[in-house]
Amino acid sequence: DEDLENARVKYSSVLSIKNSEGEIQWNRYNAILVANTIFLSLFTFASNSENPTIVLKIIIWVIPIFGIVLCHLWLTVTERGFLWTAFWMEKANEIEKQISGIIDPVKDGKKMRDIIGSGITKKAASTIIKIFIFLYILMFLSNIVLFIK
């Protein structure tokens, strides 16, 4: 009975940690998304200025570089967040096997993910980041083309 109760407490704790990790991950994702939106707005403002000052010219050159670096970090922390979430789900699955009963939410959730396809959210999140990287590369190349002219 004591082992079963310990397993239940651990199970509950692991699911709480997994949920907390997921919440932290999406908060971090959204914060970096906002930062990228600000970068793009600054770049657009600076690029559309008719008589750009030296500061605006620097912004036009620096934003794409900062954006690419930020996106690299964004991709790294997003992938790490998904790894941690998967780790905690696996731990919950292991503990659930010890206390299995009529209802096994982690096991049943895994079956459902297998049916609908796993990794869709991770792929979508990564694709959005890669789109931002592509936009920053285009901005940088545009700067080079305009500089050569």
Image (tube, rainbow, N blue to C red):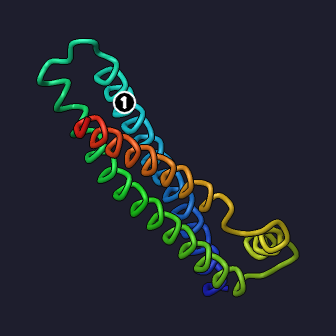
Give the residue at x 82% y 69%. Answer: 112
**Dot 1 surroundings within 10 Å: few (below 14), some, or many (20 or more)?**
few
Kindly indicate the quadrant of the structure image that contains residue 14.
Answer: bottom right
Which percent across, then down, holds residue 7?
61, 80
Which percent across, then down, holds residue 18?
55, 64
* Above or below for 65 versus 34: below
- Residue 147 shown left or right of residue 28 in the figure: left
The residue at the far right in this view is: 102
Asked which secondary structure carries label 1, the reply is helix
* Above or below for 56 versus 80: above
Which percent across, then down, holds residue 98?
69, 87
The residue at the far left in this view is: 54
Give the residue at x 21% y 40%. Answer: 62
Q: Nearer the viewer, residue 44 or 4?
A: 44
Amino acid type, residue under disc 1 in the picture: Ile
Give the residue at x 29% y 15%. Answer: 49
Q: Quadrant of the N terminus?
A: bottom right
Q: Which residue is mark 1?
A: 38
* Above or below for 29 versus 39: below
- Residue 33 shown left or right of residue 120 in the figure: left
Give the residue at x 32% y 24%. Answer: 47
Q: Quadrant of the C terminus?
A: top left
Q: Nearer the viewer, residue 97 or 132?
A: 132
Which percent across, then down, holds residue 110?
76, 74
